[in-house]
Amino acid sequence: MAKLTLRDLDVRGKRVLVRVDFNVPTEVRGGKVRVTDDTRIRETLPTINYLREHGAKTILMSHLGRPKGKPVEKYSLRPIGEYLYSLIHHPVIFSHDTIGDVPKKIVNHMENGDVALLENVRFQPGEEANDPEFAKALAELGDLYVNDAFGAAHRAHASTAGITKFVEKSAMGLLMEKELKHLRDGLQNPAKPFVVILGGAKVSDKIGVLKALMENANTILIGGAMANTFLKAEGIPVGASRVESDKVGLARELLELAKQRDVKFLVPIDVVEADEIRPGANMRNTSRLSPQHGITDGWQTVDIGAATIALYQEEIARGETILWNGPMGVFEIPEFGEGTIAIAEAMAQSGAKTIIGGGDSVTAVKQAGLSAKMTFISTGGGATLELLEGKELPGVAALSDRK
Ligand code: ADP
Ligand code: MG
């Protein structure tokens, strides 16, 4: 069912509660909390600016970190509010209480176009418990609700789902709309060849995604630690590599499913192996992998190899739609990041529609300085994966239907 969007609402003079995802990476420097990656904040600016331009009173809510239902100073949103001020050049009134008299008073004094930010919703136990009392207390602060927190939309919490029961109308924000457009609607009928690149830590994290994309993809390229489980399924010795031994049977099933569906399913034909996962470890490119020639005993895979990079580059160059989630190796260590960067570069040069599916892959693309060359980069992690699995997100499902 189609949902209301921000543009469907008449917001002038209204108090609009907006759930955003300001759960950004921070560090403490000189005794102050600083934002180290502001992408998620910047991505909500279209919604915030739209509301201001249309004369709404904007009340922002977010979580930050995992304070587990009680106030934890380092997870206060106050510095994030200060940061937002520097982006919108308009005061951001901060409420050090999330609900109750303090925010009520603030909200009652707001003028059209003003912006307020409530303290971390996860300082309250009711948030993650999706407690109706807490949801109601939040709802009392506004007239309308907008959810723009795509990164939290896979959670049915008070500020992402429960609150919609206590407001007249609830709609998705502009970022939410954009994420759904690219990751859900745009992948229903993708221009072909549709090439999917999947990597990262675990097969078990991505089974749902693999199965769902098997319906639509022409080519699937596997890398990262999850490739080890597929190598093992093919009888290739994996040495001391990170493997999910209990998922080898499943990997075999997936390889079989790909055959049935006529999906070209490629796993690395060579890898970079290292004797340890640390900078300066001994490392080398293996020869062609086979049941006779696998990873050296006691060594482990840390990246895809040169022949695999060349093979994957060819497939990427042929694609019209390319979706990537999960790095090809331990890219946090530069020596082990070549495969991951090569994939990012191949995508940037492909001329295809390119979509990066969130999490560590996004970090890798940013580090490579290639973000601007991609069609779309998701701000989600878990939410992105759930959407790609074809699941309905609770934070979207709870919004008002479009009549
Ligand atoms: P994403 O966040 O993009 O979905 P994941 O969280 O699934 O990706 O996986 C990212 C992690 O996988 C990275 O920390 C990376 O170091 C790790 N990784 C990738 N390849 C390997 C490997 N061969 N061995 C061990 N860890 C790996
Ligand atoms: Mg990750």
Image: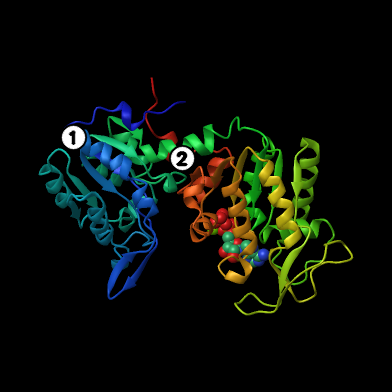
Q: Give the residue at x 75% y 49%.
A: 266
SS for callout 2: helix
The amino acid type, in three-letter code, at marker 1 is Gly
The amino acid type, in three-letter code, at marker 2 is Glu
Instruction: Please say if 22 is above or below 67.
Output: above
- Asked whether 42 or 226 is in front, the reply is 42
SS for callout 1: loop
Residue 368, image x, y percentages: 52, 59
Residue pointed to by mark 1: 55
- Asked whether 278 or 257 is in front, the reply is 278
Residue 377, image x, y percentages: 49, 47
Residue pointed to by mark 2: 179
- Whether disc 1's CB lies below 8 Å from ligand 1 is answered no
Q: Residues within 10 Å of mark 2 (few under 14, many from 20)?
A: many
- Asked whether 221 or 369 is in front, the reply is 369
The answer to whether 194 appears left or right of 236 in the picture is left
The answer to whether 222 appears left or right of 42 in the picture is right
